Image (cartoon, helix red, strand yellow):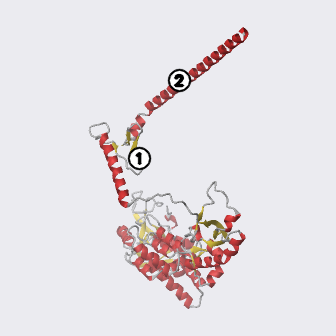
């Protein structure tokens, strides 16, 4: 709480409605300001802007009254006087509109960049009007359209460049004068150079700032517009930032892509390949290749040149390039050899010399790797199988459906039974609806709905039943073992008797 004993002024408050230059140290932040959230947002950058350009808009203040009966209690935020004494103005003012500007000025004074008594233009309001004035300032404020902000940054940068500064220096100066980072200004410039159709859509609120940033991931207007037009036709989540970034990424590639490493950045640029600095993806220092079809062509040309010698060294008849391992159509007279299957017998040297090797680019782009082969097509015996006609397939499908429905009708209706409202017929695609048995019986599948609560209610009984079943099974197993042992003992006894009889017969002889 402010200590009024430090205040020397004690005179009638100035008349409301006038603009006065009031020393900064005679101002105090008021609780009468209706903005309660985000008061401290970006104060540092606002302070830099005020220090560079000056305060462009006055503050709105009301006289701060203090109670004579309690000198330590100021009447802040419209609170009643704690002592009930008479309110007296003592030369201080509460800021009811422009609180962020006031805090920025205080920050500059605390850093000794402004004197404590720096004169601040203020319009004085009646205290009874304070809340209404603050509400009007915050509600009726119209936020600048982002597209206008981008244009403003570009205009300022162009003005600095016209004065003789290079673009990096102009961006740095602009960032310093507006209390922003260099990266922030560079991002605004990238957004300012979006394709005109996309900027217009932003002005007309047909897409969000996040969507605009997604389109500005690359600077190439052709790529931007290609993805923009596709998304404008989408019936679902038009201009979704995540989808935009994904689509743009699919039509460009980073410099560490294996194709770029294999071809070489300089070779790509020498062939007319374009590159672009990436923005708004957390990888702003990275660059991407824009002409992916050109990169693919260069990779194929380089691979086609290297593959003949490589295939010969590997012992193959010839080789071909399969970028991405997409299994291109086999050359005439050849078929894919599935040597990679577990248990496959490795091909002999003779088989390799008759085969065509398939190569792709190594994962790190360091060279080519063999990913498979095509072998000479084998002649297969005619099995005599004749594919069914569409009419025959339709007739078979009809017969299956009639069987299913007949089986369900044989089960009977669920209405009037304990299954009413709980049982239903399964869809044939995930459960076999009927299964025929050798004895002429048929199992018909029925699904029954049971609530989790009902299952939990039966859990104790289920445990008892399970334990009883296990005990019965164990008892049956023990009985079976006893019977087996008894049979074995009987067999042994019979064998002993047979031996005794044999001994007796031998003695008689």
* x then y, percent, for residue 423: 34, 42
What x and y, as percent, mark residue 394? Answer: 35, 57
Q: Do the residues under discs 2 and 1 have CB atoms within 8 angstroms?
A: no
Name the quadrant containing residue 380: bottom right
In front: 303, or 293? Answer: 303
Foreground of the two, 153 or 40? 153
- Taking 163 as reference, is 428 above or below it? above
Front residue of this view, candidates 132 and 145: 145
Per the image, the residue denoted by label 1 is 432
Numbered badge on residue 318? none
Determine if residue 154 is in view: yes
Distance CA(mark 2)–CA(mark 1): 36 Å
Point out the frontmost of discs 2 and 1: 1
Where residue 405 appears, x then y in whole percent? 32, 47
Is residue 380 positioned above or below 187 on the image?
above
In the displayed structure, does residue 448 sit left or right of residue 321? Answer: left
Which quarter of the figure is the C terminus placed in? top right
Decide which of tag 2 and tag 1 comes sooner along the chain. 1
Give the residue at x 35% y 59%.
391
Give the image quarter of residue 372: bottom right
The label number, if any, that marks residue 475 in the structure image: 2
Total residue callouts: 2
């Amino acid at each position: 709480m402010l200590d009024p004993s430090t205040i020397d002024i004690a005179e009638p408050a100035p008349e409301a409605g006038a603009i006065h230059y009031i020393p900064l140290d005679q101002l105090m932040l008021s609780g009468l300001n209706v903005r309660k959230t985000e008061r401290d947002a970006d104060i540092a950058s606002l302070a830099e802007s005020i220090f560079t350009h000056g305060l462009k808009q006055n503050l709105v203040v009301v006289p701060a009254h203090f109670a004579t009966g309690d000198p330590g209690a100021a009447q802040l935020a419209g609170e009643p006087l704690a002592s009930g004494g008479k309110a007296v103005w003592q030369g201080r003012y509460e800021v009811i509109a422009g609180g962020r500007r006031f805090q920025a000025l205080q920050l500059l004074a605390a850093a000794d960049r402004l004197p404590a008594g720096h004169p601040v233009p203020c319009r004085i309001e009646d205290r009874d009007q304070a809340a209404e004035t603050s509400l009007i300032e915050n509600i009726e404020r119209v936020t600048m359209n982002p597209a206008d902000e981008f244009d403003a940054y570009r205009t300022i940068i162009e003005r600095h460049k016209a004065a003789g500064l290079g673009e990096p220096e102009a961006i740095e100066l602009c960032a310093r004068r507006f209390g922003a980072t260099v990266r922030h200004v560079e991002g605004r410039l990238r957004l300012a150079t979006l394709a005109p159709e996309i900027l217009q859509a932003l002005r007309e609120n047909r897409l969000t700032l996040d969507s605009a940033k997604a389109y500005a991931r690359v600077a190439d207007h052709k790529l931007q517009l290609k993805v923009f037009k596709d998304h404008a036709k989408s019936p679902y989540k038009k201009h979704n930032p995540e989808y935009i970034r994904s689509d743009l990424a699919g039509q460009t590639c980073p410099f560490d892509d294996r194709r770029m490493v294999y071809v070489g950045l300089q070779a790509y640029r020498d062939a007319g390949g374009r590159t672009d600095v990436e923005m708004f993806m957390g990888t702003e220092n990275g660059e991407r290749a824009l002409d992916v079809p050109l990169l693919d062509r260069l990779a194929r040309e380089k691979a086609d040149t290297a593959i003949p010698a490589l295939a010969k060294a590997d012992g193959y008849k010839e080789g071909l390039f399969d970028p991405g391992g997409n299994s291109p159509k086999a050359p005439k007279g050849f078929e894919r050899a599935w040597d990679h299957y577990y248990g496959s017998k490795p091909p002999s040297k003779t088989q390799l010399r008759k085969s065509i090797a398939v190569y792709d680019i190594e994962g790190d782009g360091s060279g080519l790797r063999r990913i498979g082969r095509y072998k000479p097509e084998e002649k297969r015996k005619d099995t005599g199988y004749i594919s069914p006609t569409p009419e025959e397939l339709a007739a078979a499908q009809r017969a299956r459906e009639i069987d299913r429905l007949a089986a369900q009708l044989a089960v009977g209706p669920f209405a009037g039974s304990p299954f009413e409202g709980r049982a239903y017929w399964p869809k044939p695609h995930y459960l076999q609806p009927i299964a025929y048995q050798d004895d002429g019986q048929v199992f018909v599948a029925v699904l029954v709905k049971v609530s989790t609560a009902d299952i939990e209610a039966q859990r104790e009984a289920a445990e008892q039943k399970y334990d009883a079943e296990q005990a019965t099974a164990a008892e049956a197993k023990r009985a079976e073992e006893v019977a087996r042992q008894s049979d074995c003992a009987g067999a042994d006894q019979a064998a002993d008797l047979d031996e005794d009889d044999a001994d007796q017969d031998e003695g008689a002889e």
